[in-house]
Amino acid sequence: MKFTSSSLLKSLSACSTCAIALLSSINPAQAFDLYFGEDLNFNGTGNSRARLVDATNSSAAESDFLSRFDFVGTETFDSFSLGTSGSIDLAFEDAATATLSGAGRVSDMEKYGVHPLSGENYWLTNAGQNNTFKVDFDEAVAAFGFYATDIGDIGAKVNLELSLQNGETQIIDLTHNQTSGQSGSVLYKGIIAENEDELFTSVRFVTTNGRSDGFGFDNLTVGGFQQVKQELPESVPEPASLLGLAAIAGAAVLKRKSSQAA
């Protein structure tokens, strides 16, 4: 069998195409990387509902979210005076400054199922209907994580509305369960942009059924794109390794065809 330069080029081209296809399949353009944990509360009813002592699921979600950073800023609201309301300015080192605005105030109350997650204070807010609760950033950010207590307990499903820097809007589900255990529940949600097209400039809390929902908001973490660890998981081969595999495959094709030609 005659082995021509044309057939050699076709073989190498096929190997390159396979390598490109393999790279595309393991590293596709992804949507936001989401972290979620929720601990329902069935300890009593109404105002007498006891605070959850061990919020295992939400704590694990926070730990996984924070593991994506070497260092990131978190606001606990403990530096603000009780009763502070309206718009407040927040600063997150190496990320951005932010303005938190809408219905709400700094509180330390532990009643109706709301309470702080660390320290003594939190932001007691209301979202939905005529109430707007949002966080605006002075520059696009990549990460947004927080705790919410007693959220989604009156059938008012709460979502997050992200305003992307490219002008698009992204809606992300927040409350996943709709049960009696929502009252006094603890929830953690973390959002990380996987590429620069997903960077966002504001986050607004909205309800899907027109009803308002009051809840506690605490431990707000914000990170810039440069703060996010971008390395591939250990189980996924590095692109250079894949190209090496392609070269080996190409050499194998050449050797096989040379033997056939002989």
Image: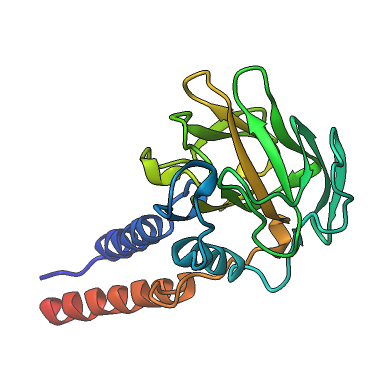
For residue 3, say whether it is visible: yes
Q: Position of residue 164 (x, y in %)?
A: 65, 35
Q: Position of residue 28 (x, y in %)?
A: 43, 52
Which residue is nearer to you in this view: 164 or 178?
Answer: 178
Q: Residue at x 69, y 26 (%)?
A: 132
Height in image: 34 above or below 160?
below
Which residue is nearer to you in this view: 51 or 225?
Answer: 51
Q: Quadrant of the C terminus?
A: bottom left
Q: How is the image coloured?
A: rainbow
Looking at the image, residue 249 sits to the left or right of residue 69; the answer is: left
Looking at the image, residue 21 sits to the left or right of residue 86; the answer is: left
Q: Position of residue 114 (x, y in %)?
A: 61, 48
Height in image: 38 above or below 130?
below
Q: Residue at x 59, y 66 (%)?
A: 230
Badge count: 0
> In the displayed image of the protein, which residue is found farthest to the front?
48
Height in image: 17 above or below 205?
below
For residue 201, say whether it is visible: no
Q: Position of residue 20 (x, y in %)?
A: 39, 58
